[in-house]
Each structure stands twice: as C-alpha cells, then as structure tokens.
Image (cartoon, rainbow, N blue to C red):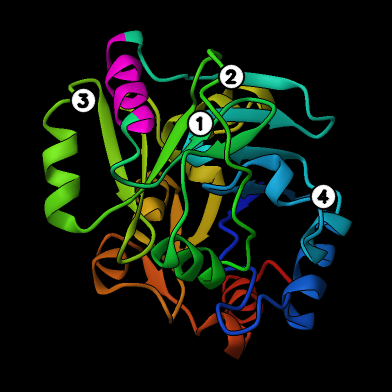
Amino acid sequence: MIKAVFFDIDGTLLSLKDNSFPDSARFALTQLKKKGIKIFIATGRHLSEMKSLAIMELPFDGYVLLNGQLCLDANKKVLCSYPIFQEDKHILVELYEKKDIPIIFVEQESLYINMSNEIVEAAQRTIALPIPPIAAYSGNPIYQATAFVNKTECEQIMKHLPHCKMMRWNDVGVDIISNQGGKAIGMAQVLKHYHLQRDEIMAFGDNENDMDMLAFAGLGIAMGNALDIVKKVSDDVTDTVDEDGIYHALQKYQLL
C-alpha cells in the first residue's frame, strides 16, 4: 500500500517548456493529501530557488533538497544534512577561486557563483532560474557545487574529488555532492522520520539525478520525457509532464 509519494520538480512536476505546473498534477497532489497520502519534494534545487514556484502553494510533508544533501520536514526543520568533506571542499574552493570555470556553491542558507558566461545563462534558462549573485567563498560548509563543464572537463575534476560524486542535469551542468548523499540517501532518512518503508513509497523523476531515487522507491515511475537510462531503472514509464503523466500514473495505480 502506497503511503507516500516523492516528486522531482523540473521535468516532472514542472514543464520544461514553460516551467508551468499542469492543472492535472495540481489536482492529483491535492487528492493524494485528501486521501492521507504524504507528498514530498525531491530535487537538486535549493529551497530559495523554489519559493516563487506554483508547487509551493501545496502543503508538502517534507523536502529532499540539493539531491539529498539537506532534508527538511513540513515546517522546514532540518532532518539530515550531508556537507561535502573538508578534503574535497578545499579542492573545490581552489577551482572556485581560480575562476577558470563557472561554479555555484550551495550552502544551507544561500548560494552564489564565482563567475558567469553564456553557458551559465543558457543552462539556467532551461530550469527558469536566475544566475546566483557573484561572491567570494564564505567559509561555510558546502552542500553542493554546480559546475558548468562538458563531460571531459567533469571527468578531470572528479579525479581530484575522491569523496564526491556527480549528477548531470544538463549537457553542461553537473551537481557535485558528497558520495554519502544522493536523493535515495535523503529519502531513507525521511522514511525513518515518518516511520515508512520502501515498499510503501512511490517516486516520479526524469533525469540522471533521479535514478537512485527511482530505484530505491517501492514503485519508481519515469516520466515520458525522461532519459532512456532513467527509464531503464524505473518500474514503469508514464506520459510526459505536458501530457498529464503524474495524473495518469496515479490513476493507473489506483491512488486517485
């Protein structure tokens, strides 16, 4: 019996075409809440990047943020956090200060970037987000670093970060996090807090950073617009976000 559902944001709850929140998805999530099924966000975004989104009008029961590095309950109280290890942080700070490549540092309360260019502008447009302010490293713990690099550059960087892993969300955008994190790790802590089991949860996603979440969930659903590698690790594939995929899947599994 499904007691909770986790949702990615970009390309899952929100259209990649215009960042809209389909009425069918809004209705579906509202119905889940009415039936006593908990709903959670599981995203690579920082909380500050979600405040203006239409989805935030809904009463979510918790948030798996920064690809699982920071998890909050319904009242935004921290349930768990996994900052990047000191050794790897020093390497990232060196890269950040060299300014050879654009890097966003994400802290618990804020995020900022070392430089910007057309690549950053284009990547941020795909998820309808502004470019963070340019600032020097604050000295605070780093929960996620977003590097705007191609695959070759990324491979070179990751060779020097033994305690990190990366998840690509765009052709030129990768999120770098602690290797003890990930959406599935964050979800596990949320389940523990709410006394839920893996076979009692369902999850929806579309991109590489959703793969561990979809594999972890008792029922992992890939959106129709998901990458092929994401579909392969999922239990089922629904329609695209623009074709009411959330609604159709929840209806198929008799949750509506």
Q: Few, some or many C-alpha atoms within 10 Å of disc 1 (few <14, some 14-19, many ≥20)?
A: many
Amino acid on which disc 1 is placed: Gly
Q: Earlier in the sequence, mark 4 or mark 2?
A: 4
In the rendering, at what x and y percent does residue 180 appear? 34, 22
Q: Nearer the viewer, residue 55 or 117?
A: 117
Q: Nearer the viewer, mark 4 or mark 3?
A: 3
Q: Few, some or many C-alpha atoms within 10 Å of disc 2 (few <14, some 14-19, many ≥20)?
A: some
Which residue lies under the disc numbered 4? Answer: 36
Which label number is shown at residue 80? 2
Q: Nearer the viewer, residue 227 or 146?
A: 146
Decide: is 236 above or below 190. below
Which residue lies under the disc numbered 1? Answer: 186
Q: Residue at x 29, y 41 (%)?
A: 166
Q: Which residues are magenta?
A: 87-97
Decide: is 115 above or below 55. above
Which residue lies under the disc numbered 3? Answer: 161
Is 15 magenta? The answer is no
Question: How far apart are the two marked residues, 4 and 2, measured between alpha carbons?
Answer: 24 Å
Q: Earlier in the sequence, mark 2 or mark 3?
A: 2
Decide: marks 4, 2 in contact (CB < 8 A)? no
Q: Is residue 248 visible?
A: yes
Q: Residue at x 35, y 18 (%)?
A: 89
Q: Nearer the viewer, mark 4 or mark 1?
A: 1
